[in-house]
Image (cartoon, rainbow, N blue to C red):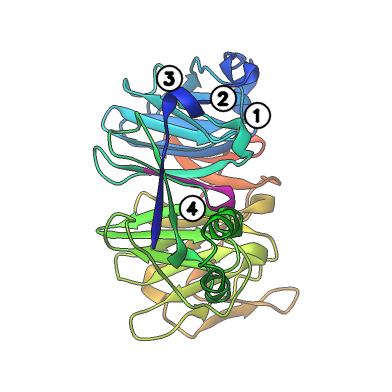
Amino acid sequence: MVTKIFISLSLFFVLTAAQAQQAFQAPLVKDSMLLDAYQGEVTVVVGERGHILVGDNQSVSQAIVPTTVTLTAVDGLNETFVAVGHDASILRSSDSGNTWELVYSNVELDRPFLDVMFIDEQEVIAVGGYGLFYRSVDAGLTWTQEQYVSLLSPDDIDYLESIKDDEAFYQEELDFIFPHFNRLSMQGDNLYLAGEAGLVAKSTDKGNSWERYEIDYYGSFFDTKELLSGELIAIGLRGNMFVLSESSDWVTLNTCATTSLNAIVAINDQFLVLGNNGVVFSLDPSSINSEQMKAADADGCRLHSSLTRIDTDISSAITGAVMLNNVLTAVSADGLQSIELPN
């Protein structure tokens, strides 16, 4: 079941005075809290106080941005980019990130967008806290809110079914029952959504319908990634990592980490898993289904054979990574920081 709520720009465009301000041109912006990055022919990094860094794969510099809210995610296709963040804010650039406009914001929702993804040249999806799910079919110019009951847990679906005869109460409960939607990922025609309360879901029709996976885990998931070999990886709180293969159910991969794992990125044909406290793993897809474990560490924990812990000098949360001037660079709560990969 999907509920669509069409947004009238004249009635529901709510722009606060703070959002109408231009982001401060911070001398130390590269050391500020940064939360997400896109890298293609253009590199775009977003973070706190409306900071957006734009450049090539050698260096980035701060762009002029018409908001001061924290920006949590960015995605792009060709020359069009969309960034999202707090106060349900959506920004758009049509010139490779050089200039930006605020196309939607609703402070009254009191919910942040947490991720955004281009499905194709025209269709873009933005998701976030408490079930925010918005879609654009004109490359990010205008947006429509959608709600998918199939993304709820079976218990929540049963509860809604029990009150469906009271339409007003049903909609009121539906607006508040959704978990946080944390991250979108896509491989081919498969679109995945990771979220709170054990949510991992898959869509094969551009997010117009969803099938939720059954996983014996009820913590938050922060990212998923389908490998080229077909396995699906899901990562989340307290170092939890799961893999789903076509020939088996969800299996836990031991990470020997107790901190949250935030993102899975593919850089130079290498998969990296990034987490809090500077945690970085290299993931070897060829041994993902192995039952072998590495030798025990000093605490007696045995890391799964597909994972290699990469030592860093970073102590803050890492939420993304890009290559800048041929150096692997973490996008972190303490800004852009270099990561040295082992030979």
- Quick one: 80 or 228, which is closer to the camera? 80
Mark 1 surroundings within 10 Å by alpha-carbon count, few (fewer than 14), some (14 through 19), many (20 or more): some
* Residue that carries the numbered disc 1 in the rendered image: 32
Mark 2 or mark 1, whichever is nearer to me: 2
Which amino acid, mark 1?
Answer: Ser
Real-space Cα separation, disc 2 to disc 1, in angstroms: 9 Å
Q: Quadrant of the N terminus?
A: bottom left
* Residue that carries the numbered disc 4 in the rendered image: 183
Which amino acid, mark 2?
Answer: His
Q: Which mark is residue 100?
A: 3
SS label for mark 3: loop
Q: Quadrant of residue 3?
A: bottom left
Real-space Cα separation, disc 1 to disc 4, in angstroms: 22 Å
- Quick one: 56 or 184, which is closer to the camera? 184
Q: Position of residue 194 (x, y in %)?
A: 49, 60
Which amino acid, mark 3?
Answer: Trp
